[in-house]
């Protein structure tokens, strides 16, 4: 796996803190920093997600992928999956994640609660590499609900 990240503000007086990542699969992710009124040269222009937001989003995508795949392999009629992630970060550098809560909403026809519980647990404890990495510094918790539909 590879990725190339390039600073978009390498020229100009007010260069900003925007970055473009090109993944090994040929996709592009744009990232930017928050504006910094006190030190504009250190701030971004608020044009894209922050880099740490993309880490959190990637973790949500990784675990949602697992949960849907596990449910589909169990022949469950899963029709939707959303994961809302809420995270807290350390106050001092490096500002790692210290707490992450993932709330899954699974929509489908006749999906047993036990199947969703198992899928979330398997992702959290066995398959999701992003969660495994972040769990080294963060307390990761999960909850879920099943919606018929």
Image (cartoon, rainbow, N blue to C red):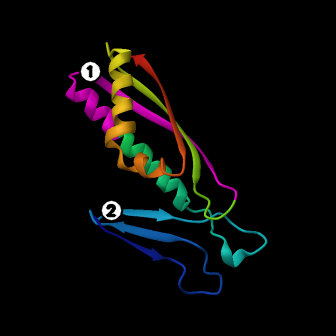
The image shows residue 7, relative to residue 100, as above or below, that is below
Q: Please identify the quarter of the rendering in which residue 42 is found.
A: bottom right
Where's the C terminus, which quadrant? Answer: top left
Disc number placed over residue 27 in the picture, else none: 2
Span of residues in magenta:
65-91
User: Residue 11 in magenta?
Assistant: no
Residue displayed at 65% across by 54% down: 90
Q: Residue at x 58, y 73 (%)?
A: 17
| 117 relative to 127, above or below | above
Which numbered tag is attached to residue 103? none
- 82 within the magenta span: yes
Which residue corresponds to the image point at 33% horizontal and 62% vertical from the top-left? 27
Q: Nearer the viewer, residue 96 or 29?
A: 96
Q: Earlier in the sequence, mark 2 or mark 1?
A: 2
Task: From the top left corner, tell me how far across and down residue 46 is, in percent.
Answer: 62, 62
Q: Secondary structure at mark 1?
A: strand
How many dots with numbers? 2
Question: Which residue in the rendered view is the most extreme toward the right?
Answer: 38
Assign a secondary structure to mark 2. Answer: loop
Residue lying furthest front in this view? 136
Q: Visible in this render: residue 118?
A: yes
Q: Nearer the viewer, residue 43 or 102?
A: 102
Percent position of residue 25, x then y: 26, 62
Q: Is residue 149 visible?
A: no
Q: Which residue is mark 1?
A: 77
């Amino acid at each position: 796996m590879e990725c190339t990240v390039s600073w978009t503000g390498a020229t100009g007086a007010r260069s900003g803190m925007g970055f473009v990542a090109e993944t090994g699969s040929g996709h592009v992710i744009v990232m930017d920093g928050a504006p910094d009124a006190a030190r504009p040269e250190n701030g971004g222009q608020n044009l894209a997600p922050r880099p740490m937001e993309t880490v959190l989003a990637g973790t949500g995508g990784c675990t949602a992928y697992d949960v849907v795949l596990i449910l589909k392999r169990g022949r469950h009629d899963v029709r939707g999956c959303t994961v809302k992630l809420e995270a807290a970060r350390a106050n001092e550098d490096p500002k790692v994640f210290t707490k992450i809560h993932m709330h899954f909403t699974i929509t489908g026809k006749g999906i047993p609660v036990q199947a969703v519980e198992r899928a979330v647990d398997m992702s959290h404890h066995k398959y999701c590499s992003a969660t495994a990495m972040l769990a080294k510094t963060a307390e990761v918790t999960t909850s879920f609900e099943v919606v018929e539909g």
